[in-house]
Amino acid sequence: MNAPFVPSRVAVRLADPGDRLAIARFLGERPDTTAFHRLEWLDAVERSTGHGTHILLSEQGEAIRAVLPLHEAHSPLFGRALVSTGFAVDGGVVGEADPALFAAAQELALRLNCPSLELRGGPLPEGEGWHVKTDSHAGFVRPLAADDEAQLLAVPRKQRAEVRRGLGHDMEVRIGTDASARAMHYAVYSESVRNLGTPVFPRALFEAVLDGFGDDADILTVLHEGQALASVLSLYHRGAVMPYWGGGVPAARTMRANDVMYYALMNHARGKGCDRFDFGRSKTDTGAYHFKRNWGFEPQPLSYACWTADGVAPRDINPLSPRYKAKIAAWQKLPLPLANRIGPLIARGLA
């Protein structure tokens, strides 16, 4: 008589360097990954900011059931937190999550002296101590059209008129990842976020992402008479393009350069084989949220979970928080060279 089959026990452990190939294979087979689950993203964040990478694995026997990538963010201003994943709008659990995996993440956070644990997307935990938000952010994804003209016609009428106005200025579009493209992007992006009142991320983060992603990341810049007006660093993942870090100088508004930029990116992405445009996330009912709706994108609620150790308040890195109102107003007045010098020191803590 054959012995009864006994399933292997599910166990959770920290990955080690020898697991990279198995993790990459597991992620490559899953349809629910994002660009922020990729090892290239995890490595880029760690290499450029010093936020250590930790990957929790849920396994049954020798088979991976779930992966939870985490970054150990640390900052004198914003404290310490374990986040999944750093500088990302997604990157939570991939696979079959269970309470043991979330409990292991809590234990790891305490062991690393991180009183906050933040999970962005993916299966989320339930139970005491976890705070789940489902109405603070929305994502925006829409299929790309068949050709350039169809793409323009797919834009709602009022927004389409803005794109046509921009196209009438006969601006130049450049796409690349060379030193010139990187310099133009950082100059435009850093000025854009300074004008919004927020510190710019370290240039090393953009460099590391571009270097790590290879053909799956590039920069599109819109110029007029040789001057860069708008620029965006985009990520390409499984048929979707995501314009992730983008902005424009004040003249971009008059020239409609941002509108031209996104339209040009849609056409460029189709040429790279993409079939979806992922406009990223925006905070609900903000200007960016309504801008994306004007383009015909429907908001899709995103869910995030946060856990904090007993007696510790959740960290607050929301720029819309009232506590930052005066700081934002002061930052907008800083000379750009000064903002670019001290901004990355602050922004690396906003993982």
Image (cartoon, rainbow, N blue to C red):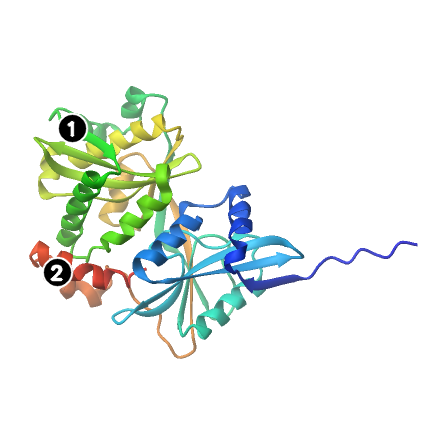
Q: Dividing the picture into quarters, in which one does residue 140 lie?
A: top left
Q: Which of the two marks, 1 or 2, is nearer to us in this view? A: 1
The answer to whether 20 appears left or right of 351 in the picture is right
Q: Residues within 10 Å of mark 1 (few under 14, many from 20)?
A: some
Q: Dividing the picture into quarters, in which one does residue 235 lie?
A: top left
Q: Dividing the picture into quarters, in which one does residue 49 lie?
A: bottom left
Q: Which residue is mark 1?
A: 172
The answer to whether 99 appears left or right of 53 in the picture is right
Instruction: Indicate the amino acid at tag 2.
Output: Trp
The answer to whether one can see residue 69 in this image is yes
Residue 273 at x, y = what percent?
40, 28
At 49% from the left and 55% from the top, the residue drawn is 93
At 8% from the left and 59% from the top, the residue drawn is 334
Taking the view exactly as shown, the residue that stands out farthest to the right is 1
Q: Quadrant of the C terminus?
A: bottom left
Residue 93's disc is: none
Query: In this rendering, is residue 85 above or below 149?
Result: below
Q: Secondary structure at mark 1?
A: strand
Whole-number angstrom distance, CA of label 1 to CA of label 2: 31 Å
The answer to whether 220 appears left or right of 80 in the picture is left
Whichever of callouts 1 and 2 sits on the residue coming sooner in the sequence is 1
Instruction: Indicate the amino acid at tag 1.
Output: Glu
Q: Which residue is mark 2?
A: 331
The answer to whether one can see residue 99 in this image is no
